[in-house]
Image: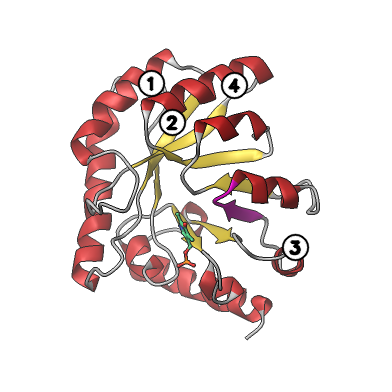
Amino acid sequence: MSIKQNLLDIRARIVRAAANSGRRIEDIKLVAVSKTVAIEGLAEAYAENQKVFGENRVQEWQDKYEHLAADCEWHIIGSLQTNKVKYLNSRIVLIHSLDRLPLLEKLNSEGEKKGGVWNALVQVNVARDEAKAGLEVNEVRDFIENAVAFPKVKIKGLMTIGALNATAGETRDCFHQLRELRNSLQTVKYPEKIQELSMGMSDDFETAIEEGATIVRIGSRIFGHRSEK
Ligand SMILES: *Cc1c(COP(=O)(O)O)cnc(C)c1O
């Protein structure tokens, strides 16, 4: 299957999942996860009007972004080391992996230095997967309230990764919990609306959409299997 065909297929499935759950397609953004994919693959997706890409390594993103058109939107989806923050620039539209105070502090000071603001999602380890980053569900409210002190970062919502070997039911429950958490945060003392739910990957994006995902992150179902990590 070609990247083009894969994309058309994924889009059709997103439309169906949205329709099945009575949601509007405009409320669901597809991030094409292009980690380890060569520029040619991204260019093929771009030719099919895919302009939103997710990378998990800053170095790899740096090597890629200037080769693609300026109207591409870049998302950082992987663990972000504080010593890499200085390499980020305004081409980064959303950071999905805000998961600790030192990173929040670093993003804020870098925003001050560069005269810009970062949009970010708080990563939540709903599945309590030891191997995964993210705050615990019960830490999120305080984290966001404390984030008021860091105005160069705007928290727009939450992100989670389903557990690796979870059953379909466990995965649905995980996404459901993230939505419930988001809903419970509507009373949080924070100037931005906490709205976005980044959840769902190649194997579980339809469930995520049914559970309210506003952003899905899909890699292998678009670009094929990754050989490396
Ligand atoms: C790799 C990755 C994805 C995409 O995974 P696929 O299973 O290939 O769709 C999504 N989110 C994060 C955080 C990732 O690291």
Quadrant in the picture for residue 62 = top right
Callout 4: CB less than 8 Å from ligand 1:
no
Mark 4 highlights which residue?
110
Amino acid, disc 4: Glu
Residue 227 in picture, x, y percent from top left: 56, 73
In the rendered image, which quarter contains the N terminus?
Answer: bottom right
Q: Secondary structure at mark 2?
A: strand
With respect to residue 141, does 25 lie above or below? below
Instruction: Please tell me which residue lies in front, 189 or 132.
Output: 132
Mark 1 highlights which residue?
147
Residue 128 in picture, x, y percent from top left: 22, 51
The answer to if 40 sits in the magenta stretch is: no
Mark 3 highlights which residue?
39
Callout 2: CB less than 8 Å from ligand 1:
no
- Which range of residues does the magenta coloring cover? 52-57
Q: Secondary structure at mark 1?
A: helix
Would residue 139 be seen by someone viewing this image from the given angle? yes
Instruction: Using the numbered discs, state the Cα–Cα distance from disc 3 to disc 2 in whole angstroms.
Output: 30 Å
Instruction: Using the numbered discs, state the Cα–Cα distance from disc 4 to disc 2 in whole angstroms.
Output: 16 Å
The reply to whether the C-beta atoms of the residues labelled 2 and 1 are less than 8 Å apart is: yes
Magenta part mainly helix, strand or loop? strand
Residue name at image x 43 percent, y 31 percent: 155
With respect to residue 179, does 42 lie above or below? below
Marked residue nearer the N-terminal end (2 or 1): 1
Q: Specify few, some or many for label 4: CA neighbours under 10 Å numbering under 14, 14-19, or 20 or more.
A: many
Marked residue nearer the N-terminal end (1 or 3): 3
Amino acid, disc 2: Ile
